[in-house]
Amino acid sequence: MAMLASLATLLAAGCSDDEATDDGGTIRPLETEGASASGTGSGSASGSGSASASGTAASGTAPSGTASSGTAPSGTASSGTAASGSASATGITVDTSVTVDDPLVEEAAMQYTEYVRGQTDLIVSDATVFTDAVRANDIEAAKAAYAPSRQAWERIEPIAGLVEDIDVAVDARVDDFENEDDPAWTGWHKLEYLVYDVGDIGPESGATELADQLDADLATLRETMSTTDIPASAIPVGASELIEEVSGGKLTGEEDRYSGTDLWDIAANLDGSQAAFETLEAAVEAKDPDLVERIEAGFEDADALIETYEDGDGYQPFDELTEEDSDAFKTTLGSLAEDLALVSGVLGLE
Amino acid sequence: MTVDRRTFLRGAVASGATLGVGACRSGDDASPPTSAPGDRTDTTGSTDPDARNGPANLGGGGGGGGGEYLEFEGRHQTGIAAPTTEDGLLVAFRCTASDRDELAAMFQALTDESRRLMTGEPYEEREPAFPPLHTGHVGNPAPAVNLSVVTSVGASLFDDRFGLADRRPRDLVKMPFLANDRLDPQRSHGDVLLTIASGHEDVNLFALRQLMRVTRSSLTLHWMLEGYNRRTEARKGEAGVRNLMGFVDGTSNLDHEDTAAMDRYVWVADGDREPAWATDGSYHVVRVIRMLVEFWDRTKLSEQEALIGRRKETGAPLDGDAELDVPDYDADPDGALTPLDAHIRLANPRTTKTDDDLLFRRGLNFSRGFDRDGLLDQGLAFASFQRRMSQFLNTQERLAGEPLEEYIRPQGGGFYFALPGVTDSTGWLGQGLFA
């Protein structure tokens, strides 16, 4: 969650919708069912041409709100508009200052929005397998479901984490609290601690309540994301932040310290980053094919590394990671992060 | 002049004490008698201590930093024999390049960036949708503060990964445990060592970040140490700097401007029974030596001086009156004036036989907090450059068991080989390794 600031800033910048801006850039869970939005990310990607190249156009249109989402593909073209629509209607904070005159980028925004929504659906269903096991006080079943339950979350974490307070509620590590007994500590890692370290998820442990809370928080996430259009400018940032997530905190094994399932999370982070980049690949290819080649090679190298740790449907325990492979991850991901950091610039996504 | 001199710890590791990077170059006892008496001054510094002090306009960029931009090209890497500076940074990396081509690309990137940094070539300012090409914290370009980057390689680079085994300098091995050592593997060795030195720590950190950015795909941090040398006014030949034991350090170091001495003692030459590519490079030893400073501060002055072999205040040898006086051990065969096991006497006995072992020292004082016993973690990052590893090893062997060991504890560092310089605009560091 540490990495979210820049994304949040990105999404918040330029938002002209008052109700959405005062929270520092996070997306607010809906309080009212959004009128507009209704996502349809898929719409016709085309519209394009119109694309008011002028950088300012978008912010101008934002306030009018309605221009938005559904119509985005057409008219104003900018991905910013798509976002702005939903902003006014749903309380979501998004960047409306960005204009994009590239139909490929517009298409990417819709594709990625769809991807994110698909993942949030998965998050809810996969988490339920885990929380059901917890409620059933079945430790072995809970262990089997823990790492899988986080996969979809880890694929879109930088985006999902923008929903106000959600990241802290569901994914905080104990380091953010006084100690393990702090009642404010909730979410996956608190349950991980009870399942793997304490070994007690019985009636007195509070696990059931934590499981219920996790389900509720993730339901809120899904609901919010179902009406949020992800602006194109957020895609490269999200792709980068997933890599930063791995580089800054996962190669140490601190994320899943009780279960040792960090390699699952790493694989999902890579997966999600690649999925995000791929939506933009055609647009980047048109402007800087060498960059695409480097990024693809970077993902291939990273995939090759993580694949050697595959074990059945999942991954080996973190402590199996050799020092040599840890180094290889550091340089491979470091290099990938440098290249992904160029995508916004290449596409002119300020 | 306030300077004192002496070397001190030269021994710590070896003979001299100075560390590596920047600062002083002096050598204490290690320097040849010819240069000892009075020649040498730092060009950058002794006469004008402020020159190496930090730039007044850090952040402004573009010169005016109180120093200059250095030449990058030369037979030898410029930073090794450049005038010493106030601040230094030692950074060792592990290399993950998957083959020779990637390794070569890394050296090329390192070369280009080092050249840019040392010569003060500004970075392009890109469109705001891109991350800036430079950190921005010292201006663009960084102020002129005598920044240098020296690239050295460790013995491990010549293992079976890159097919370079037959290119290994003859005496380059992984640094063994030497007398009194408690080497921490997390702070020792490494495939590549960068020695970054300048008049300001901010500029060193700037250089490090820029260098890491272009080598991200192949180099990962292994150990790192920041150090400094506070220069005091000094005459040529005097150390101009004290170590954290309070003694002058670097009094009779080799004079970097004395070409004959540098050729004799520092640079590998054709005919040295080294691989051809190694000519103009230099064996580079780094010893991170913790000083038990609380214990030292409770030690009688007379004992401190006997342990080192010099007067603390003046830096004079125990049989002399001034820092630049050359001790006459022949006249003191029983150690009545300078104990036979005094640090400087062991490090440089000033005999014909040991005259071949002189080292070019460039050390750094360091402080990195405190340990779990609540004791300050301070010391000297000794560094020396020499033509043959035997110069260091012989010196080290003489120092083994010295009484000063009770106060010092070598904890890290390594044996490296500083690559030959780059002599034209198309050349790159390490090119000869791949020829």
Image (cartoon, coloured by chain):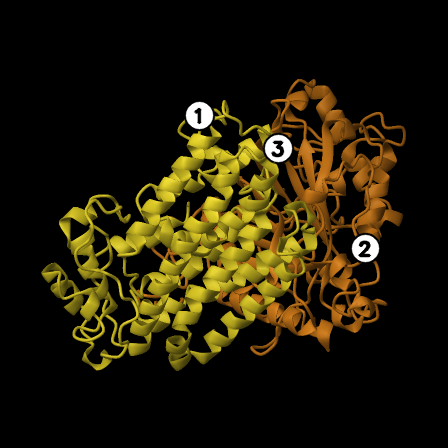
Chain colours: A yellow, B orange
Furthest residue toward left: A64
Check disc 1 and give the amino acid type.
Answer: Asp
Is disc 1 placed on a helix, strand or loop? loop
Tag 2: amino acid = Val
What is the number of the mark on residue B173?
2
| Marks 2 and 3 share the same chain | yes
Would residue B132 be found to the left or right of residue B83 on screen?
left
Q: Which marked residue is nearer to the observer: mark 2 or mark 3? A: 2
Rendered image quadrant of residue A231: bottom left
- The x, y position of residue B255, in whole percent, is 67, 53
Place of residue A272 in the rendered image (x, y in percent of width and height, measured from the top left): 46, 60
Q: Nearer the viewer, residue B120 or A226?
A: A226
Image mark 1: chain: A
Which residue is the site of mark 1? A182
A109 horizontally vs A188: left or right = left
- On the question of residue B312 being in view, the answer is yes
Say which residue label 3 marks. B378
Q: Are marks 1 and 3 in contact (CB under 8 Å)?
A: no
Cα separation between marks 1 and 2: 52 Å
Residue B285 vs B330, above or below: the answer is below
Instruction: Please tell me which residue is depicted at 75% across the width and 72% down the height of the picture.
Output: B277
